Structure formats: C-alpha cells, structure tokens
Image: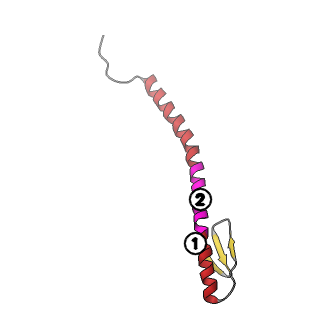
Amino acid sequence: MKDCAGITLIELIIVISITGVLVFALGFSFQDWNAAYKVESQIKEMPSEIMRARVMAMCKKKSALCEAGSSAIYNIRGYKSYA
C-alpha cells in the first residue's frame, strides 16, 4: 500500500465542526464579559465625575446636581459632560 501523508475529508470536517462549536460558545462568553466590563468601567468613572461636580460647585459657589443618564451623560446643573 502507498504511504499517504495527509488528512482525510472526515478528519477535516471533524476539526472544523469542533472549532465552530468552540467559537460559538466563546462568542457568548465574550459578549457577557464585554457587557460586564462596560458597566464596571462606568462605575469606576462615577467618583471622579462626582468630585468634578463638587469642584465646579465650589468654584461657582452654587449647589451641584449630578444626574447619571443611561448613555453615560452626566448633567451638572446645566453643564453637560459626555463621558
């Protein structure tokens, strides 16, 4: 018999299907991780925005109101900051 150096079509299909299943499973995991990362980064930005509002209020000698919107827009008594 001949010495065949290579892979068969069935081996190739098995490898491609396993790779497809792994990519599919990891895709959902990456989406969950990405959403959690965005939330965590916005939470970490909030103290600095509150401190900035405090400094602005002290400079203008007015009270400051911080409103956090869903699109990460902080409104500080008429002054908008896009984070």
**Residue 30 x/y as whole percent:** 55, 47
> Crowdedness of circle 1 by 10 Å Cα count: few (<14), some, many (20+)?
few
- Residue at image point 52% right, 39% down: 23
The quadrant of the picture occupied by the C terminus is bottom right
Looking at the rendered image, the quarter that the N terminus falls into is top left
Report x, y in % for residue 32.
60, 49
Residue 75 sits above or below residue 30 on the image: below
Q: Nearer the viewer, residue 63 or 11?
A: 63
Specify whether residue 77 is painted magenta. no
Q: Which image quarter: residue 74? A: bottom right
Look at the picture and state if 1 lies above or below 77: above
Amino acid carrying mark 1 in the image: Ser
Q: At which x and y percent is residue 63? A: 69, 84
Instruction: List the residue tagged with mark 2.
Output: 40
- Boundaries of the magenta span: 32-46
Quarter of image, res 40? bottom right
* Figure check: 36 above or below 42: above
The disc placed on residue 48 is: 1
> Relative to 19, does residue 34 appear above or below in the rendering?
below
Task: Give the residue at the far top of this rendering.
Answer: 1
Question: Quick one: SS at disc 1?
Answer: helix
Q: Residue at x 32, y 18 (%)?
A: 4
**Mark pair 1, 2: CA separation:** 14 Å
Identify the residue shown where x is 59% and y is 78%. Answer: 52
Question: Colour scheme in the image?
Answer: secondary structure
Q: Is residue 37 magenta?
A: yes
Residue type, label 2: Glu
